[in-house]
Image (cartoon, grey):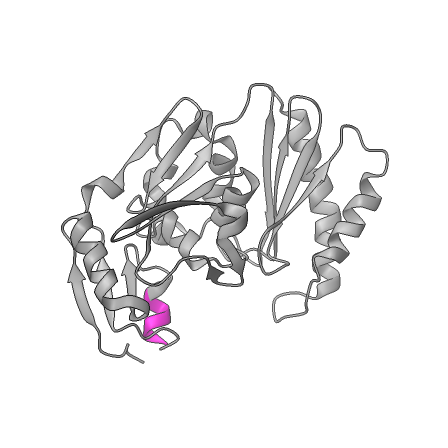
């Protein structure tokens, strides 16, 4: 199947892209890497009237590292971030997770922010954004706003992105000294969307947070005190709270069991690697 007809705008600068989105309203979509959007177009799961290509906007293809956070532009490809020399130091959780994002071929074209916009609950990058307490920068023709990741994802492939608006960047806080990070995932094959993915952050004071993707409609986080004696009970309660469902990839029972077992291993790994 081929996509329905659409107008194509190859924006050379930000103002042109924002004007095209304003004119297109709810019928306009941004395209950068196209690894999620193009298959949806071909299957006619999405039929926008206008596609706005942002790949020529140089300002969106930058990774900027500050003292407390790193900002990743909407045009940055996944492979660019994967090969960024500062990744393991500035964003160790993302460094651990990004080899699990799709395959080398899709990472060479797909963008970081494209995965955020797609908001698949099994995707690794939205999981990392929520786990790290990051934020999403959104722009339209006359307004710019910053939305916390926990408020940006509204449900399965549903976000707070408004008509005429686009993601221009995401911001990820850098880890505090003495913290630890770990990422684990179970999928049918390496590179497939996760059946369950776990990201753990161990704080310097011994407390920890476990964020789980692939189960609920959005990644969810469990905060843990230092050295909880009832960790297994907390993980069991959390697994049931996620309301797992059966699908063609796994049963709800299997997903709950993975949350319990994989969650514990990921938390223990994060605690053990605190620096």
Q: Residue furthest front?
A: 142
Expressed as whole percent of the image width and height from the top left, the position of residue 197 reads: 60, 49
258 left or right of 173? right
| Residue 155 within the magenta-colored segment of the rendering | no
Task: Name above or below for residue 230 compared with residue 168.
Answer: above
Expressed as whole percent of the image width and height from the top left, the position of residue 268 reads: 71, 33
Q: Of 140 and 110, which appears nearest the observer? A: 140
Q: Quadrant of the C terminus?
A: top right
Magenta highlight: main SS: helix
Q: Number of callouts in the render?
A: 0
Expressed as whole percent of the image width and height from the top left, the position of residue 94 reads: 48, 37
Task: Name above or below for residue 154 compared with residue 129.
Answer: below
Q: Of 209 and 39, which appears nearest the observer? A: 209
Q: Residue at x 67, y 25 (%)?
A: 272
| Residue 39 within the magenta-colored segment of the rendering | yes
Q: Residue at x 37, y 49 (%)?
A: 113
Expressed as whole percent of the image width and height from the top left, the position of residue 10 reads: 15, 58
Q: Residue at x 81, y 39 (%)?
A: 231
Q: Residue 250 is drawn in which quadrant?
A: bottom right
Task: Name above or below for residue 205 compared with residue 35.
Answer: above
Q: Residue at x 25, y 73 (%)?
A: 49
249 left or right of 81? right
59 left or right of 185? left
153 left or right of 1? right
Magenta region? 38-43
Q: Quadrant of the N terminus?
A: bottom left
């Amino acid at each position: 199947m081929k996509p329905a007809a659409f107008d194509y705008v190859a924006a050379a600068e930000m103002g042109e892209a924002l004007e095209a989105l304003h004119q297109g309203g709810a019928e306009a979509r941004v395209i950068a890497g196209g690894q999620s959007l193009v298959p949806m177009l071909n299957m006619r799961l999405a039929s926008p009237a206008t596609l706005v290509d942002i790949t020529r906007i140089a300002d969106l293809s930058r990774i900027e590292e500050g003292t407390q956070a790193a900002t990743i532009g909407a045009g940055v490809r996944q492979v660019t971030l994967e090969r960024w020399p500062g990744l393991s130091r500035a964003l160790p959780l993302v460094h651990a997770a990004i080899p699990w994002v799709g395959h080398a071929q899709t990472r060479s074209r797909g963008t970081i922010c494209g995965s955020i916009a797609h908001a698949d609950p099994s995707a690794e990058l939205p999981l990392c954004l929520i786990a790290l307490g990051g934020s999403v920068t959104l722009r339209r023709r006359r307004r710019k706003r910053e939305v916390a990741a926990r408020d940006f994802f509204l449900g399965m492939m549903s976000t707070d992105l408004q008509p005429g608006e686009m993601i221009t960047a995401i911001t990820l806080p850098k880890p505090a000294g003495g913290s630890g990070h770990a990422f684990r995932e179970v999928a049918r094959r390496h590179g497939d969307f996760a059946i369950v993915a776990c990201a753990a952050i161990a704080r310097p004071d011994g407390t920890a947070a476990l964020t789980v993707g692939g189960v609920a409609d959005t990644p969810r986080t469990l905060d843990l005190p230092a050295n909880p004696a009832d960790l297994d009970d907390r993980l069991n309660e959390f697994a049931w709270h996620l309301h797992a469902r059966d699908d063609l990839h796994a049963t709800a029972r299997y997903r709950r069991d993975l949350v319990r077992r994989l969650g514990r291993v990921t938390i223990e790994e994060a605690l053990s690697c605190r620096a």
